């Protein structure tokens, strides 16, 4: 997939996988930093000894929301940029499912399927992705999500056939 595409090309990619990110390591330092930022210090995330003794995970696991928050970095890493884009906006999720825990030290990567691309007014394109976050060497993914982003562009850049 090219690093950059034109606004006119986006809708032609609907139904295709548009990117697979590099691997991101979710280590204890990242988990602890996220716990500090969100004030979620539940022991399953921040206490390796207790998590080893009292959970079936064998140690600490990442917050589901930490894994979800990595989607922005994963998207930036692999999904082609729209040449005419002036700004990208996270619009939200229609569905998020946390399928399997991400253990401290695991590596994850995102797979992005372009499910929808539709123009919303003269200067916005709504993009719907089907996203799966794979955990290296695990059968089940960490999460699946239907993610919506908005691309703002100058009105004069809108394709004539859109």
Image: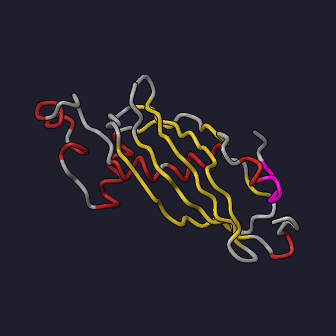
Is-magenta flag for residue 127?
no
Viewer-proximal residue, 60 or 20? 20
Residue 100 x/y as whole percent:
33, 36
In this view, 139 is above or below 71: above
Highlighted magenta segment, given as a residue range: 4-9
State the residue at coordinates (35%, 60%): 37
Q: In this view, does 112 lie to the left or right of 40?
A: right
State the residue at coordinates (83%, 58%): 8
Locate the C terminus and report the quarter of the image it occupies: bottom right
Q: In this view, does 26 lie to the left or right of 63?
A: right
Viewer-proximal residue, 93 or 28? 93
Number of disc labels:
0
Residue 49 x/y as whole percent:
16, 34
In this view, 129 is above or below 56: below
State the residue at coordinates (80%, 51%): 5
Locate the N terminus and report the quarter of the image it occupies: top right
Q: Is residue 36 left or right of residue 116?
A: left
């Amino acid at each position: 997939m090219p690093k950059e595409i034109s606004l006119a090309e986006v809708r032609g990619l609907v139904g295709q996988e548009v990117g697979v990110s590099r691997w991101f390591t979710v280590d204890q330092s990242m988990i602890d930093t996220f716990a500090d930022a969100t004030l979620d210090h539940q022991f399953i995330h921040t206490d390796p000894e207790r998590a080893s003794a009292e959970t079936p995970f064998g140690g600490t696991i990442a917050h589901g929301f930490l894994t979800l928050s990595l989607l922005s970095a994963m998207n930036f890493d692999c999904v082609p940029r729209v040449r005419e884009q002036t700004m990208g906006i996270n619009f939200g999720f229609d569905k998020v499912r946390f399928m399997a825990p991400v253990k401290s030290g695991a590596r994850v990567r995102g797979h992005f399927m372009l499910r929808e691309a539709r123009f919303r007014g003269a200067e916005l394109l709504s993009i719907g992705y089907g996203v799966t976050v794979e955990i290296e060497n695990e059968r089940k993914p960490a999460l699946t999500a239907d993610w919506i982003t908005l691309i703002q562009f100058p009105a004069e850049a809108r394709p004539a056939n859109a």
